[in-house]
Image (spheres, helix red, strand yellow):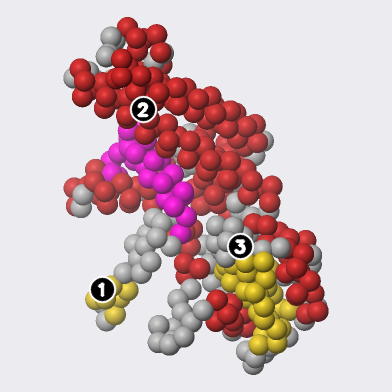
Amino acid sequence: MKYSGIDLHSNNSVVTVTDETDRVVAEKRIPNDLSRIIQFLLPWREELAGVVVESTYNWYWLVDGLQEAGFVVKLANTGAIKKYDGLKHSGDEADARHLAQLLRLNILPTGFILPPEQRALRDLARKRMQLVRSRTSHILAIENIAARQRGMKINSNQVKRLTADEVDQMEFTGDVGLAIKSNLAVVITLNAQIDLLEKRLQEKMNERAEFALLSSVPGIGRILATIILLEIGFIGRFADVGNFASYARCVDSQHMSNGKKKGEGNTKNGNKYLAWAFVEAANFALRFNAEAKRFYERKKAKTNTVVAIKALAHKLARACYHILKEGKPFDVTRCFA
C-alpha cells in the first residue's frame, strides 16, 4: 500500500509518495499544473490508499481534478494538525511526508469535500456576505460624514434610500458632498449586486424541504436559513449534536486535568460562517420570541450579555441539528424546556 501527501502552494506543489514504512518512494516539486501532477502519481494510482491535499485557499482545482482522474482524495484539516515541535529541520518535503504518514496511521484530521455544484452555491452565499460587509462600511462612512459636518443623525435605512439629488439638497460644501456621493454610488451598486445574488440563492434554496424547516426556527429567516444549510452541506456528516455544535463554534474549548482547567484549545476550529449565523439568529430570536428571551435573561443574570447570547446560539444550533436529522419543524417546548 502507498500513501501520498501534497504540500500545496500558490504556484507549485510538493508531491510525495511513501510506503508502509514511511520510506519515500517518489517525491518532486511540480508547478501547479493538474496534468503534470496526475502524470506523476499515475504509476501508483491502484496502490494508493489516498492522496492528502492541504485545505488551503486554492485547493478546489486540485481536489476536483484528482477525483475525476480516479484518485481517492482526502482534504487535510490544517487547523487541526500540529507537527512535532521538537523537529530541528522542517520544509515542504517534510510537510508532504507528514500528511502521508498521518494517512497511513489513520489519524488524519479531514475536512468535508462538498460536491462542486453545492460548493459553488455556498461560495455565492459567502460572496453575498462579503458584499454586505462592504456596503456596511460605506453606509457607516456616510453616517460619520453627516454627523461630523452637521451633527446630523442618519440611520442605515435612510442611507440606503438616499439619492444624489437629496445629497445636493443637504447643501454640503463641494468636497464634502462629493465624498458622500462617492460612498453613495458604491452603496447603490452593491445594493443591485446583493439583490441579484439573493434572488439567485432563493431560486435554488426554495426547492429544498430543509429550507422551510429551518425557517420555522425563531430568529432564522430566509437569508440565515440559506447560509446555515449551505455551510452544513449534509447533516449526516456529523456523528451527533455535540459534534455539530462544536463545528458551529457554539461550545467552549478547554483542557481539563484532575477537575481543573489547564488551558484552552483552538477556539477558532470550526466554521466561522455558521458561528456568525447562529449568533445573528440568537439576537433576532430574543427580540421576537418570548421563550428565547426568557432563556437569555436567565443566562444574562448569571453571567453577561456575550455569554448569554452564545448560550442562546448554542440552543438554536442544537435545535437545527435535530430538525434536519428528524425532518420535523421547530418545537419551542422541546428547545427551551
Vertical position of residue 189 compared to residue 14: above or below: above
Residue 261: numbered disc = 1
The residue that label 2 is drawn on is 139
> Which residue appears at 55% of the width and 76% of the height?
92
Left or right: 16 with respect to 270? Answer: right
Label 2, label 3: how far apart the Cα atoms are: 38 Å
Which mark is first along the chain, 2 or 1? 2
> Which residue appears at 71% of the width and 59% of the height?
64
The span picked out in magenta is 270-296
> Which residue appears at 48% of the width and 73% of the height?
81
Question: Is the C-beta separation of discs 1 and 2 under 8 Å?
Answer: no
Tell me if residue 290 is in the magenta stretch: yes
Query: x and y percent of residue 304 in the render?
Result: 21, 49
Label 1, label 2: how far apart the Cα atoms are: 44 Å
Left or right: 113 with respect to 86? Answer: right
Tell me if residue 90 is in the magenta stretch: no
Q: Residue 115: in sight, yes or no?
A: yes
Left or right: 139 with respect to 68? Answer: left
Residue 11: numbered disc = 3
Nearest to the observer: residue 70 or residue 286: 70
Label 2 vs label 3, nearer the camera? 3
Circle count? 3
Nearest to the observer: residue 85 or residue 183: 183
Nearest to the observer: residue 164 or residue 269: 164
Query: x and y percent of residue 124 in the render?
Result: 58, 41
